Structures are given as C-alpha cells and as structure tokens.
Image (cartoon, coloured by chain):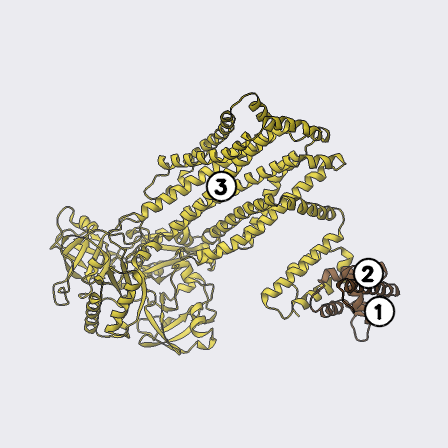
Amino acid sequence: MRRPPSWFRALLSLLPERFRREHGEEICELASRYAEGRSAPGRALVWARAGLDLLVVAARGRTGLFDGLVRDVRYGVRSLRRDLGFALFAVAIVGLGIGASVTVFSVARALLLRPLPFDDPDRLVFVSNGDFGRGQALSAISVQSGHVESLRASATQFVDVGGYHLFDREGDHTLHLAGGPVRATRLRVTDNFFDVLGVEPIVGRLFAPDEVLDESPPVILLTWPSWQRHFQGDPGVIGSSVRLDATSATVIGVLPASFDYTQIFAPGSRVDYVAPFPWSERSHRTGNTLAVIGRLAPGATLASAQAEAEAAVLPPGERINDFEPVVTPLREHLSGGYRPTVLLLSASVVLVMLMVCANLSNLLLARGAARERELSIRAAIGAERRRLVQQLLTESLMLAGAGTLLGVLLAVNGTRLLATLDLRIPMLGQTRVDATALVLAVGAAAAVALLFGVAPALRGTDVDPGESLQDGARGSSHGRGHSALRRMLVVSQVAMACLLLVASTLTARSLVHLTRTDLGYEPGGTIAMRIDPSQRFDDDEVRVRYLSDVLDAVRAAPGVRAAGLADMLPMAFNRRWDARAIDRSDERVFPYMRLVSEGYVEAMGLEVVEGRSLTADDGPDAPSVGLINEVLARALWGDDSPVGSRVRTSGREFEVVGVVRSTRQLSVDQEPGPEMFLHIRQLADHNAIHLIVRADRPTEDMVALTRAAVRGVDGRVPLDQVVALGAVVDSSLAPRRFLAWLLGSFAAFALALAALGIYAVVSYSVAQRRREIGIRIALGATSTLVVRHLVRDTLTMTALGLTAGLGLALAASGLIRGLLYGVAADDPLTLGAVALVLLSVAVAASWLPARRALAVSPVEAVSGEIGGRG
Amino acid sequence: MIRRNWFHVLVALAERDLHGAAIADDVLERTGGELRLWPATLYRALDELVEAGLVEELGDDERPEGESRRRRYYRVTRKGRVALAEEAGRLEALAHEVRARLGDPA
C-alpha cells in the first residue's frame, strides 16, 4: 500500500490531539485504500478530497476561532449570494489581475531567475566574438576553433572551455531506422562540452579521447526526445550501430531530458543526436564555427577571464578570422536581451494589480455604504465592532480566495499556452507556474484582501446605530469621507490606466512601423521549400544538372514568374565570410554570404541598382562572378562604382557584376548589413538548397504546383521545410507582436477598470445627492446645469489622474525606450491621444449616471426623504 | 431521525463487529458506491456514536482472533439497536406514506 503524501500527514497535526492519537493511523490507512489502484491524477484527487475532509473535521473540532470562522464564512456566502453580481465581478477582476501577475512572474522566473539546468550555472560564461557586432548574426557569436584551443591550453581563469558548432542545420541528415528513413538534426560539440556544463548522460557514456579525432569512426549521443521517439527509450540501443546518411555510427550514450539544448541555446529548433567536433587543423580551417562556453575557475572574475581570453587570441599568421573575445555570464548571453521586455511586463502587471486593488477597495467601500443600515441593526442588537470587522474581512478574504483560484487557473493555462508559442525565446518553453509563483499569488491575494478590505471594513462599521438608522438613506457626515477616499482611488486609477495606455500604444505603434518597414525585398507572393539532392547524387556535376532541371520545370509551371535557389533564407539563417576588395584597400569586411542561382534576385523581388543580375551562363567554366549589396558597395568603394572590380573571399576571386538594394537579413528591426551573393553553379559548397518561387497564385496552389514540378524531375529527392516568406518575416516579429498584444490587453483591462471606477463614483454621488439634486431642480436649475456639474467633477478627477499618469510616463520612459522602433518614448502624438481617449471615456462613464440624475423628480426626491424617516 | 453518517455506520455494525475501514467498505458496497465515508468524517462519527452510547469499542480481549491491536473494533450497543430499529420503523412509515401518495397499491 502506498504511503500517504507528506502534506496529508502534516494536516493530521491539525486534528485535536486525542482524536489524532486514536485514529491518525487508521485515517491514513483508509485514505490509502481509497487511493489504491487509481491513476496518478485519480490518486491526487482522492488525497485532496480526504485532506479536505480532514480540514473540515479539524475545523469543527476546534472551538473559538474556527467556530467564529465557520459562522463568518456561512454568513459571508449568504451575503455574497444576495449580491451575486458584485461578488462575480470582484472575483473576475481579482482573478484576471492575479492571473496576469502570476503568468508574467513565471515568465520572469523562467527567463531571468531560475538557474540554468547545469552544474553550478553561475560560473558558466559565454565568449562571443565582438568583431562581428552583436545581435542575431550567427558569425558574431562564433569563433574559429584554433583560438579556443589556444585559450584552453593557457587557461588558468577557466576550469575549461568548450563549444558547440553553430552551423548544423535542421534536418540536414538522415537516420535510417527500422521503420524507414527520418530527417535528423545533428549538433556537433567539442569533446569537453558536456564536462564544461556538468551534464552527464543518463545511459552510456560521453565521448572518449580516441573518438573525437578527424579520422575516428563515427560515434553519437542521442538526445532524450530522439531516444524516446526513434528508439522508444530502449537502453539496448547503447553500443549498437545505426545507419546515418551513407555511413554507420555507434550510439554511445543518451543525454538526460534536463539537457534541453534547443530550449536553452536554439529555441524553435530541435536536435536528434550529438556528434563530436574535433579539435583539429581541419576544424580550425572551416572558419568561425564554435559558440564558446567556459566555466570560470574558483576565484576568477569576468574581468580576469576576459583578459586571459584576449591574451589567447592567435597571432595574425595562424588565423583566418579575428577573435575579439567578449566574456559574459551565460545567462546574460541567453536571456539578458529580454530583460527590458520582462521588466516592462512586470511593471505593467504591478500596475494592473494595483488597479484591481483600487477597484476592489472602491467596490467594498460602496458596498459598505449600502450596508450601513444592515450593520447598524447588527450593532444595535449588540454585535461587537470587532466581530463586524472580522465579518467584513472574511468576506473580502473569500472574494480574494475565489479570485486567486480563478487567477491561478488562468495562469496555469496562460503559461502552458505561452510555452507552446513559437516565439524563439530561450527558456520560454520551460515557463511553468511553480510553487514559488503560487505562494506569491496567495500572498498577493491575502495582502489585497487585508489591505483593501480593512479600510472599507473599518469605515463600514464605524456607525452610530442611533444616527444611522434615523438618518435613513442619506449619507451622514462620514459619507463625505467615503467619497473623498473614493475620489482619490479614481484619480490613481486614471493615472495607472494612463501609464498602461501609453506603454501599449507606443509598443503597438512600433509594431506598425515595423510591419511597414521596407525590407529591401518583397516577401509576399513568394514561397520556399528545401530540397536535398546531396542525399541522392554524389557527383557535383549531376547535382548541378538536377538543379537546372528543377528550375526549368518550376519556371514552366503556370503562374510562376520567377524561381531561384539559395543555400539559406533571410531571417532564418545567416553566415558571414571575410572579404576584401582587390586593388582597393586591405580592409577586410565580413558580409553575409549567400550562395544563390540565377532567378534568385527576381524571385525574392530584389532590385538591381547597377550592373546586371546573375544568369545561367555564369557556369562552372565561366569567370567567377558575384553580386554585392549597397551597404557593401559603400563600405568598400565609397561613391565609386564597384561593377567590374574584384573581391577576394573563401580563397577565390570573384568579379562584381552587379549591385542590389540592401535587405534586412537578420530581422525586421535590424538595419541591413553588407551582403554578397555568389553563384551556386560556381561554388558547390552546399548540401540542402532552398528553392524560392514567386507566382501569381494563392500560396497553397503555388506549393502544390512547385511540389509537383520538383517531384516530376526526380521523385526521390527529399523535399521539406515549405514556407511562405511572408510567414518567415512574420515569425521574426512574433515576440514584438506578442508583447504588443499583452500590453494592449492590460491597457484595455485597465481602461475598463478606470471607466468602471468613475462610473461607480458618479453613480454613488448621484444616489447620495438625490435630495440635493431634486431641490436644485425644484429651485429652477436646468438639467444641463446639473449634468454639467457632475461631469465637471469627473473631468477634474480625470485631469488630476492624467497629469500624474503622463508625468510618470515621462519619468519611466527609460524602461520602454529600448523596445521601441520608429517612435520616441515621449512621442507627443501618443501622449495626446492617450489623454484624449481617457478624457472621452471619463465623460462617457460619468454621462450615463448623470443622466439618471435628471430623472429625479423634485417632489419624489424630497418626499422620499420624508418617507425615509417614517 | 438519525444523522445519515450515523445511520449507515449503525447499519454496518448491526450484523457483526467491524473496524473502521471495514465499516467504510460495507457502506460503500451497500450504497452501490454512492456514499463514500471519508476517513476523518468516519472516525469522528464513530467517536460521536461512542459518546452518545449507541456504539462501544471492543476491549482487547474481545477482538477477533489474529487481529492486531492496531485497529479499533466497534459494536452496536443495546441503545444503538433500539435507535436503529426506531429509524427503520420511521423509514418504513415514510415509505408507506410516499407509496400511498403515489397511488401505488403496494
């Protein structure tokens, strides 16, 4: 029989001492028996139910506190049921507030706070290559392996330094399984990579020294998902040989599930197996390949590690590429870039939560005022004030408790949804609502209930039975105190809504600017798919002939306007090579390098501004040619024409035959860098190729037509990764879109709360002043005058709130500045628009109840007063 | 009228002496899985029944043979039997009344 969970045993201690001693063991035994033979969730349910039962019995067994509590809860349930609308609304806003807070906190925790799943992760550093600038350029974070070897050899500030190969692409390899071949993604790492991270295989072993040489027979480690998917988690696969591409490899181990490489280093991708990347001359010659991770030695600092890395850079004669090491903590490298976003979101949910509190407080105050008579009667028949306060607090705690339940439910679903979104943000996929977040939620709710329940409770019970009962419906002297407090709450709500509106408007406008940004090419109406002739044809010449046939077939398909090939798509993958203009200067630049065919320029919608495009005649035997973009032209030739000049790269010379307009290679929000296009027919340095097609057809038709044309040439060449280029661009904007969407919903929620706050205050004031309004009308005040009075009152509150809100928005602009694109943080148009929206909402929210004041008939208002006395 | 939990516990004990878990099993089975007595509720009901004098706990020498001392055994008292019989009579009368109102000849 299973043992009861430890929390259940802990609950036992709540039972009265004698009862526990006599029946504790048997209670556990019976609960275990109920739990037996059920699935895990079923068991959890049974234990929860038994735990609840235990709590109820424990509460009933105690006198005093619990007795009072049970009575208060019962009374609270009754009283809230009578006022169901109020209760549901309060629970809903507390739930939304807590849901948003817990979700954002969980994201912050996953991205910035929770330790990386490695051994002593705070000692891990990333060594990037400053020469290439920062950002998403892959070459900017990769280093030639020789530099790293040199650093390893001299390391005193590092325990060790290793790395992973950055240019293994998704699905580039084929794993032949019993059920047929599957596309597999390789990750190559240095032999010590897992030692640096402190990751141990769960089955088998890591690479041995004689397995990581250039000529070693291939060995691989499986990742956990691949082991499960392809080998059904069979430990027998260790030591066996699998067919991989054209060779066979021995499986030597399986990495643990906790080593989620893709989640941490390459979100949105996947890895099936890990192979060694040798420390060899050949590896060194392939240029910038390694992303470098080191573990700091005891006592070493970032600065000392930085100095050591700089000293280890190879001298010019021994290197192809420069290395300007920049040592940063690994976590900083992975998710530091998201810190501003997370901070902004955190600040926003704090505001949302404060607004919820203000609103709740406002509601409770209003309710307290409405219940004045009820409380007076209870006080008159002898209820102590302490009991009344306790009663009201119990009610607000109940509301907060139900709200928390709703909020946690929302947060659990919200984070689950978030984790499935393909935003390509490291560790976002690991976002979970954990125990800390739950404690936070419960703590926040309790604080809300107490802080914002106490004032209304104290006020509500501060009644003189005699006066209040005689006074009838009209607010007595402290009614004015009520409304002053409620006005303050409204002013602060307007201020907070203003802040949130400013933030969301700025973010949304940035997004609009970005979607309208000229990318330099035309992604609409273009699709791409990947074909891999290297899987089928060994011979370079046959492969080039195959590609020509494919292009011819696709171009002949109906509706196709242009078709071309490229070894990588913009915004999906990138690579930089060094290049030098011969006879111009010795200055080296590092353009993005793409291998493309004739037709690429046309299919992508690039514009040739000078010279010519690439043609099919630029074959293997023709002179080597290339295109450059305007940025590269300006960098190397200034105002002179580069056409006809020669560029040296990759150990060969190419003649520049044309200049194309610059495109945004990395993402929509990063300016174009230098770029060069070499002809795929002249440089067979590729495996899989992207076929890019532009046509006047809907995307699905285009895909079907192209697929059919490719299959028609050869049915056995693998074909995958079909995308619309528009979708590739879109996904590069996905995180921003998501941020804008989140802030937008926060702002909308805040605006609604502020409007409700205003509405409630004006309604209340109309109700309180029925007699006064009636008398005014009786004395000849026109209806316009009365409405104007009420609306003016609202406008004063709104103006105060706006002033505070806009002031705060300007003061906090530093928080958002870095996240904006094409709009300033103090953009007057945005601020003005927000002010206008808030003012209109305020007028609308006060107009409705003010109109109600007009319906007051003078006779009724005054006589109602007399009737109230009766 | 006897409380529902008390009633079912008494019915379980009417036939033979049982320990707590066996009582819970009997109730669950007899009610076709409808009524599951949750542990703390069950033992609290037993305590209350003992206090009301409807049930008594077996002494050490009265336990069935071979049973460890870990489990407490219970037996219905004379007063308990009377109360149960009264309840049965009440239910019978009630059932009779219901049938009459429904026009059911039985």
Q: Chain of mark 1?
A: B
Residues at marks 2 and 1, CA–CA distance in whole angstroms: 20 Å
Would you name the residue on which mark 3 appears? A752
Chain identifier, yellow in the render: A
Name the mark on residue B49: 2
Dot 1: within a 10 Å radius of its alpha carbon, few (fewer than 14), some, or many (20 or more) residues? few
Q: Name the quadrant containing residue A365.
A: top right
Dot 2: within a 10 Å radius of its alpha carbon, few (fewer than 14), some, or many (20 or more) residues? some
Chain identifier, brown in the render: B
**In-front residue for pair A564/A259:** A564
Would you name the residue on which mark 1 appears? B60
Specify whether B70 is left or right of A773.
right
Residues at marks 2 and 3, CA–CA distance in whole angstroms: 56 Å
| Quarter in which the N terminus of chain A is drawn | bottom right
Residue at disc 1, secondary structure: helix
Q: Is residue A2 above or below residue A455?
A: below
Q: Name the quadrant containing residue A718.
A: bottom left
- Amino acid of disc 3: Ala
Q: Are marks 2 and 3 on the same chain?
A: no
Q: Which dot, 2 or 3, sits closer to the camera? A: 3
